[in-house]
Amino acid sequence: MSCTFEEELTAFIDGELSPPRHAEIAVHLGTCAQCQSTEALLRGTLAKMALLPESIPSPATRRQVLAQVDALPPPLKERLLALLRPRVLVPALGLAAVMALAVYPRSRPGVDEADPGALELAANLELVEDYDVVGLDSFEDMEVVTHLHELEVQ
């Protein structure tokens, strides 16, 4: 393809171009033998394809193809976003915080084992487990669950 118009011939044949661009390519086709040849090839291919019998897959073939599509691993973007869901992120962050608090005070001599931050985190572990059980999908849902204890008291 050495002619720049040649790239748009399929859209020209399919009627997908704007009227001014369609007219411009029609004029060009009158002067460019290479584009005329490519247009004839494309139109001939479309005519031959129209003569082919219609292929309708059997229900079994359709199920097999759809099963293979379903078996494909999700794209990387979806896998990374799944890691940011509250049901994964909150327990993981809670576990990381507990581990950090369990290791950090021991590495500093003279720090009392009853660290207020560790006690608060331990008190909230039940809440973190609730996030996982409920199956939250957004951070707004987390806020609702966070305030559920206020409703229980009333």
Image: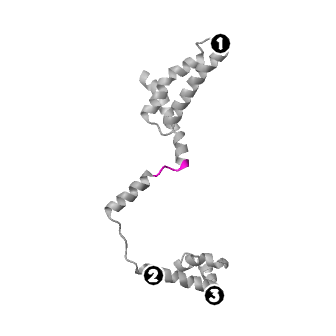
Say the numbered circle drawn on residue 137: none
- At mark 2, the secondary structure is helix
| 29 over 7 or under it: above or below | below
Would residue 147 be seen by someone viewing this image from the given angle?
no
Of labels 1 and 2, earlier in sequence is 2
Residue type, numbered disc 1: Val
Colour treatment of the image = one colour
Residue 80 rendering spot, x and y as whole percentages = 55, 44
Residue at x-position 48% and y-position 49%: 73
- Residue at left offset 45%, top offset 29%: 130
Say whether disc 3 or disc 1 marks the residue closer to the N-terminus.
3
- Provide residue 41's location: percent of width, then percent of height: 54, 83
Q: In this orientation, which residue lies closer to the viewer: 124 or 60?
A: 60
Taking the magenta stretch, the answer to whether it contains residue 108 is no
Secondary structure mostly seen in the magenta stretch = loop
The tag earlier along the polypeptide, 2 or 3, is 3
Residue 6 place in picture, x, y as percent: 62, 78
Residue, far bottom: 30
Q: Which residue is mark 3?
A: 33
Q: Is residue 143 above or below residue 102?
A: below
For the view shown, which residue lies furthest in the left direction? 59
Magenta residue span: 72-76
Mark 1 — residue? 111
Front-most of 49 and 133? 49
The residue carrying mark 2 is: 48
Rendering quarter of residue 25 = bottom right
